[in-house]
């Protein structure tokens, strides 16, 4: 067994995305349009607060305005939807992100569906999911798009490869499966009820771990030479992949942290800029 040939550096990919955005942001500013992302945080979960702060800092560094909407832990579904609708109606807000998970009393899906498709920069609505399935979504879910962006940046072939995705969430496992399928991979989507999971993972030329369990994917599950993308983030900066174990088998692998995460945030910024550009185009053509 040989060590992995390539460590897929998410910081480098994210930097490339943001460098390409800087001129586009400047162009919008010259037109009097300040790209703006509104982030909604319900409750006081420390991890969620950290994620929101990271996203806000990333916006600031690129020249994107960031609005942080904080709602109390006991917020109802109706109250959250009212806050979302207010942001939908604000022409100066181009993207809306609802930090999840939300408190248990809230119907998260109903809240996601309240986000206008034009401002769904995190790709959480069912309409956005459907558009992604057909391959023409303006804003696919950010982490799936980040995974594809990493593969593209490193010129890793997708066409004709067998991709095994572990996880079926509507904003990660399912959409990344569809995106890989649309790029002509043969895709197997696994989940908690999949039998003989290890044997299926061993068939994957590309393995995407999105199961939410620390060090779940073991090295002996990995086909020699496979590409491993770890979309998990667990307490203690630990991914869903046993990194040291899988490093021996994989030809390329993302670390945690500094793998998929930074590219996810860069993708969110990219979507916000693109939403602002759509407004600029609308003004120009109206």
Image (tube, rainbow, N blue to C red):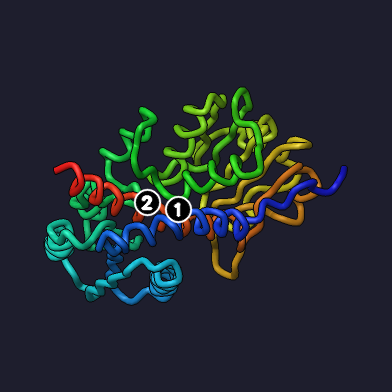
Q: Is residue 256 above or below residue 253?
A: below
Using the rendered view, name the quadrant where residue 69 is placed.
bottom left
Residue drawn at point x = 12 percent, y = 58 percent = 89
Q: Is residue 1 left or right of residue 67?
A: right
Judge from the rendering whether residue 253 lies leftward or rightward of residue 14; answer left or right: right
Say which quadrant the C terminus sits in: top left
Disc 1 to disc 2, C-alpha distance: 6 Å
Which residue occupies 66% across, 37% down?
156
Residue 15 pos. (x, y %) = 56, 59
Residue 201 is left or right of residue 17, and the answer is right
How many neighbours does mark 1 have within 10 angstroms: few (below 14), some (14-19), or many (20 or more)?
A: many
- x 75%, y 43%: residue: 250
Q: Can the viewer see residue 103 in this picture?
A: no
The extreme front residue here reads 30
Along the line of sight, the residue nearer the viewer: 127 or 108? 127
245 to 29, vertically: above or below: above
Which residue is painted at 25% across and 74% down in the image?
70
Toward which corner of the image does residue 117 lie, by quadrant?
Answer: top left
Residue 214, label in figure: none
Do the numbered discs 1 and 2 sit on residues whose CB atoms are within 8 Å?
yes
Identify the residue position indicated by label 1 in the image: 267
**Is 179 left, or right, of 109 in this rendering?**
right
284 up-or-down from 100: above or below: above
Give SS at disc 2: helix
Q: Nearer the viewer, residue 178 or 22?
A: 22
Q: Could you tell me residue 261's position as x and y percent? A: 53, 58
Dot 2 alpha-carbon crowd within 10 angstroms: few under 14, some 14 to 19, many 20 or more: many
Tell me if I can see residue 60 in this picture.
yes
Where's the N terminus, which quadrant? top right
Disc 2 marks which residue?
271
Relative vertical location of residue 46 with respect to residue 10 in this rendering, above or below: below
Q: Secondary structure at mark 1?
A: helix
């Amino acid at each position: 067994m040989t060590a992995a040939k390539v460590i897929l550096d998410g910081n480098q990919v994210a930097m490339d995305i943001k460098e390409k955005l800087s001129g586009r942001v400047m162009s919008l500013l010259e037109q009097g349009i300040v790209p703006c992302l509104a982030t909604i945080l319900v409750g006081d979960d420390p991890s969620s607060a950290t994620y929101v702060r990271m996203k806000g800092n990333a916006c600031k560094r690129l020249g994107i305005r960031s609005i942080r909407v904080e709602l109390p832990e006991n917020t109802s579904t109706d109250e959250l939807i009212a806050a979302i609708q207010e942001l939908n109606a604000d022409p100066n807000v181009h993207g809306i992100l609802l930090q999840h998970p939300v408190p248990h009393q809230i119907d998260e899906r109903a809240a996601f569906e309240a986000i206008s498709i034009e401002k769904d920069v995190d790709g959480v609505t069912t309409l956005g999911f459907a558009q992604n399935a057909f391959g023409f979504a303006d804003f696919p879910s950010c982490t799936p798009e980040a995974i594809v962006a990493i593969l593209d940046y490193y010129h890793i072939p997708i066409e004709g490869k067998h991709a095994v995705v572990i996880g079926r969430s509507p904003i990660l496992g399912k959409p990344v499966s569809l995106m890989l399928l649309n790029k002509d991979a043969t895709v197997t989507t696994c989940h908690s009820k999949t039998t003989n999971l290890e044997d299926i993972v061993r068939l994957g030329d590309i393995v995407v771990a999105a199961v939410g369990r620390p060090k779940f994917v073991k090295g002996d599950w990995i086909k020699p030479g496979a590409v491993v993308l770890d979309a998990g983030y667990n307490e203690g900066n630990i991914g869903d992949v046993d990194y040291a174990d899988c490093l021996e088998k994989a030809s390329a692998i993302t670390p945690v942290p500094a793998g998929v995460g930074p590219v996810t945030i860069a993708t969110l910024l990219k979507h916000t800029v693109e939403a602002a550009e759509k407004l600029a185009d609308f003004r120009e053509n109206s």
